[in-house]
Image (cartoon, grey):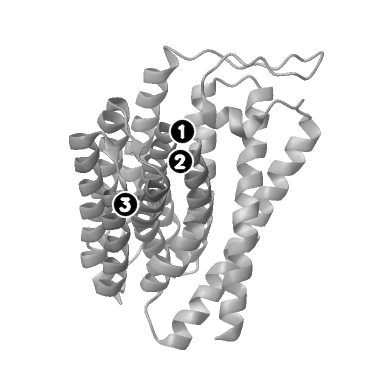
Amino acid sequence: MLFGIIFSVAGLLVLAFAADQFVKGAARLAVILRIAPVVVGAVVIGFGTSAPEMVVSGLAAARGDLDIGVGNIIGSNVANISLVLGVSSLVGVIGVSKTVVRRDAVASVISVVLFALAIQNGLARLEAAVLLVVLAGWLITLIKGRNSHQSFRTQDTSTGNIDDNINDDNINDLVGEDPISVSTETLRTFIGLALVISSAYVLVEGAQRIADALNISGGLVGYTLIAVGTSAPELVTAVAASRLNQTELLVGNLLGSNVFNSLAVGGLIGMVGAGTIQDSTLVTVGAALMVLICALSWLAMLLTSKVCRRDGIILIALWFLSVALLA
């Protein structure tokens, strides 16, 4: 039990740091390679911010712990909308644009519904393939839709400076204004990825030890400890964005993270570890709560175009309720 706790805490701490460095390095390399900002935002940053969930769930599924992988996806989706969005709304009212409601929120709800349906009778490779195909379609649609009004952000190869001619705050924050070194960012990216993979392995090992010691399901450990841990970077970023009034960025990232978790991570674990999910409560109650919480948040955004402190308190309460129902 003690080693399980030590492994889990150490894995989470290293994972949070490594994921941030991996995303930053990948985004800066993409700028050097003159990749369109919309691709950087939708693909590089989208996959990058889901890297903790992807690696942790993928390793768990490959080791035969599919319950931990599924629990992590469900728990991360719920934590993003209930805990992260809820806590951020306590800092200040979060305004939500019509574009986010129509595009990102709808995509988030559809994605979690598809994942919930895919795991009802276990997760087969065919169902995983469907999730990945839907993800590809969503990315293509997103890139085509945004590419019409975004220009390239390029680097002057003679000075190393970056031409600041786009309005993507997420990329601006990651890249910064300092000159970019190809060797430095390549090293940052590879070391970050290596640390993500190794720390994820330690985290999964620790989580499994805790589950065995407490005689609880791997799904519950994935839903709580691992999911909250892998969502910690999003929480820190979201609170900071709320303080800076970057609310559209905040909500868009959380909703986009749920799309990647459900489709990309869900598809991955189905490919590497297809099989039966032992925790029936996770598949039924957990999946239903995930869909319900995501749908309620979308409805609130649709009706009021904001998430206020009252909504945040309700969302946080729903997370605690979901844990109690799954325990």
Badge 3 density bin: few <14, some 14–19, many ≥20, Cα 10 Å: many
Q: Amino acid at mark 3?
A: Gly
Question: Which image quadrant: the N terminus?
Answer: bottom right
Q: Is residue 85 above or below residue 203?
A: above
Q: Mark 2 highlights which residue?
A: 242
Q: Which residue corresponds to mark 1?
A: 246
- Check disc 2 and report its element: helix, strand or loop: helix
Towards the viewer: 220 or 305: 305
Say left or right for 137 vs 191: left
Residue at the image position 65 percent from the left and 60 percent from the top: 14
Residue at 42% over, 23% down: 143
Query: In this view of the protein, which residue sits in the foreground, 308 or 292?
Result: 308
Report x, y in % for residue 178. 75, 27
Residue 6 position, x and y percent, is 62, 77
> Image quadrant of residue 22?
top right
**Image height of 295 relative to 120, above or below:** above
Quadrant that contains the C terminus: bottom left
User: Residue under circle 3?
Assistant: 312
Establish if 245 lies above or below 226. Answer: above
Q: Residues within 10 Å of mark 2 (few under 14, many from 20)?
A: many
Residue 71 in the image: state x and y as whole percent.
Answer: 37, 64
* Mark 1 residue element: loop
Badge 1 amino acid: Gln
Q: Residues within 10 Å of mark 1 (few under 14, many from 20)?
A: some
